[in-house]
Image: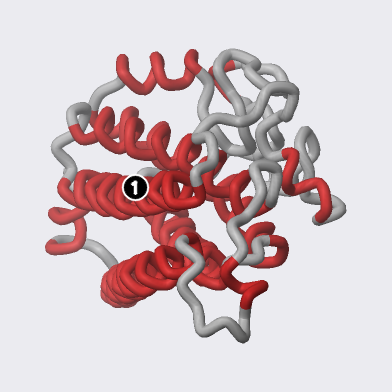
Amino acid sequence: MTAGERAAGDEDPHALVERRKTRRVRRAAGGAVALALLFAGAATVASARGEGDGAGAGDARVPGASSADAGFARDMAVHHQQAVEMSFIVRDRTDDEDVRRLAYDIANTQANQRGMLLGWLDLWELPKVTPGGERPMAWMADTGGHEHGGTDTGGTGHGGHGSGGSEAGSGADGVLMAGMASRSELARLNRLDGERAEVFFLQLMTDHHKGGVAMAEACASLCSVPAEQRLARGMVEGQQSELRLMRDMLAERGAEPRP
């Protein structure tokens, strides 16, 4: 039985109201992120090109290659790419409309954000890959507990966990950053069907979002480009809303986030 059938049948009326409320919140958050993307693009183009009135020369400076701004743009672009990949995988592994709709929303939002992050790096004339010798997420070291190898991700750790069996550390089974799925986990998602695929996707994406939220919160504190800070805050709001939704969707399937 699909989630839609349960809602139309024996689902508790209060639970149905909560589900609809969660969807409205997620749509509102998605709209806020879209507006942030629009305004961020215009503001950052001006900043990156040094277009200003002369009084705020500091605001027109292009971030350095090792800055939090550049590091966040590079790392979150990679992080987002995997979320898009997982969303496309589950879209083909289930017929459940709620899961497919969530996967579409995540893929669409994060692909757009990824394009903006890479566009900023182009405007700043900075490399899109981490400079040699620098580890992913090294720019987060100034946040204290939020640093490479020990990122506070609400329990996800750095190197992933669960069926993938990946170890903590950069590149372990393909894991580069907090919350990212391992190659083994992606392969398993590709093998599952129906509700089993739905549950595993929701668990993987929960971990992924927790890692993404930690990174975005760090950028909101450390990044110097106001437009990028605004986008990061929009990411936090949108992904936290989706985390709540995914928790409810897991509960509907008799499952819960991984410990």
Which percent across, then down, holds residue 67? Answer: 69, 50
Indicate the position of residue 232 as horizontal and vertical percent values: 53, 63
Give left or right: position of 210 versus 139.
Answer: left
Q: Residue furthest front?
A: 54
- Is residue 151 found left or right of 172 in the rendered image? right
Compared with residue 207, is residue 15 higher up or lower down, i.e. above or below?
below
Q: Is residue 236 visible?
A: yes
Q: Tell me the element at label 1.
A: helix
Residue situated in front as seen by the camera: 225 or 23 = 225
- The location of residue 106, given as percent across then percent down, is 32, 50
Query: Which residue in the protein does label 1 denote?
Result: 115
> In the figure, 78 relative to 107: above or below?
above
What quarter of the picture does the C terminus occupy? top right
Q: Residue at x 37, y 65 (%)?
A: 41
> In the image, what residue type sits under mark 1?
Gly
Please give the count of numbered marks on the rendered protein: 1
> Which residue is located at x 61 percent, y 31 percent?
130
Most foreground residue, 62 or 208: 62
Q: Quadrant of residue 220?
A: bottom right
The image quadrant that residue 29 belongs to is bottom left
Q: Residue sitting at 58 percent across and 38 percent down?
A: 179
Horizontal side of 168 relative to 188 (left or right) equals: right
Say if 230 sits above or below 1 in the image.
below
User: Closer to the camera, 81 or 225?
Assistant: 225
Determine if residue 256 is in view: no
Name the colouring of the figure.
secondary structure
Could you tell me which quadrant the N terminus lies in?
top left
